[in-house]
Amino acid sequence: MSPLIISLFFAIISPFIWGFMNLIDKFIISHRVKNVQSFAFIAAFINFLSGIVLALFLSWNYNLKDLFPSLISGIIMGTQFYIYYLIVEKEDSSNYVSLIYSYPLVVGLLSYFFLNEKLPLIAYFGMILIILGITLLSLKSNKLKIKIFSWMMLYMIISTAVYEFFIKMSTNNLPELNGLAITIGICGLVALPLALNKKIRKGISKEFKHIPWALFSEALTFLGILTTYYAMTGLPATIVSSIAAIQPLAVLFMEKVFHFFNIKIAVNPSIRKRLLPISLIVLGVILLYAFGL
């Protein structure tokens, strides 16, 4: 199997893993934990340990310049930790994910100017169709009743674009697993100062009983970053991030499955009313695949 096909496979399954992780996190926060930030600390510590354990099994004959992009991606992901849990606590997953996944536009600009990634015009048109579909999908999701500060969403959009850009840069100098170990380990390390907050520190012992849920959630985080690295290895960053924009669609279908089993973590989503944005997303992905590779 060619490296291109392998990378495309990882690019397609990655948004489903991230989307499932968002739904699981929403379920945990809505139905299990009481102190969300204390739970976030436990999750961060699991990420930190995961990075260290993975690193022990790898060769590290690289200089700091090779490690730098992965370090930056980990730092940025770590700064997202606190904001991410605040957003998930207050927003339905479909609302949050739909807004965040306008970030491929930022990745496209960064890749064009700094990585010299230039796609055919029709491939960029496919990316625009995906973003348009995501925008329409978000407008139909609960009428977009946003309860969080706009600066949080803006930061998540920009920071998500930047850390994916640095993951792409990392694959040019470093094996995927080495990059993953650094990114996930540093992500956890940066978020650990959450424990400096007295209220969060007191709640950690109470939330420790939910460590199986934290392990499950962070296993999905591990897989999400892993698939992103392998997707970036053989594909332009613009294409990987644009395909990742199907995550709101994945979340929508998974929310439907959750409701079928009477697990209510959001309003019951209607697929029929969203056929137009879904069609635009699918058409955009087809154009990217046909003309961007």
Image (cartoon, helix red, strand yellow):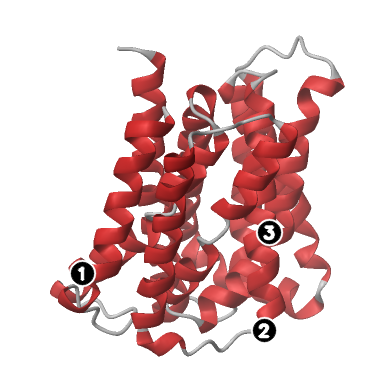
- Front in this rendered view, residue 201 or 101: 101
Helix, strand or loop at disc 1?
Answer: helix
Let me know if residue 271 appears in the view: yes
| Relative horizontal placement of residue 253, taking residue 89 as reference (left or right) | left
Q: Which quarter of the figure is the N terminus placed in?
A: top left
- Front in this rendered view, residue 70 or 280: 280
Q: Position of residue 213 (x, y in %)?
A: 43, 60
Is residue 283 shown above or below 155? above
Q: Position of residue 267 (x, y in %)?
A: 30, 85
Query: Which amino acid lies under the numbered mark 2 shown in the image of this protein?
Result: Phe
- Front in this rendered view, residue 66 or 235: 235
Q: Earlier in the sequence, mark 2 or mark 3?
A: 2
Gap between marks 2 and 3 measured at Cα = 15 Å
Residue drawn at (66%, 20%), measured in percent from left and top?
172
| Relative horizontal placement of residue 67, taking residue 46 as reference (left or right) | right
The residue under label 3 is 158
Is residue 235 shown above or below 57? below
The quadrant where residue 21 appears: bottom left
Helix, strand or loop at disc 3?
Answer: helix
The quadrant where residue 28 appears: bottom left
Helix, strand or loop at disc 2?
Answer: loop
Residue drawn at (78%, 13%), measured in percent from left and top?
62
The residue under label 1 is 275
Query: Which amino acid lies under the numbered mark 1 shown in the image of this protein?
Result: Leu
The residue under label 2 is 149
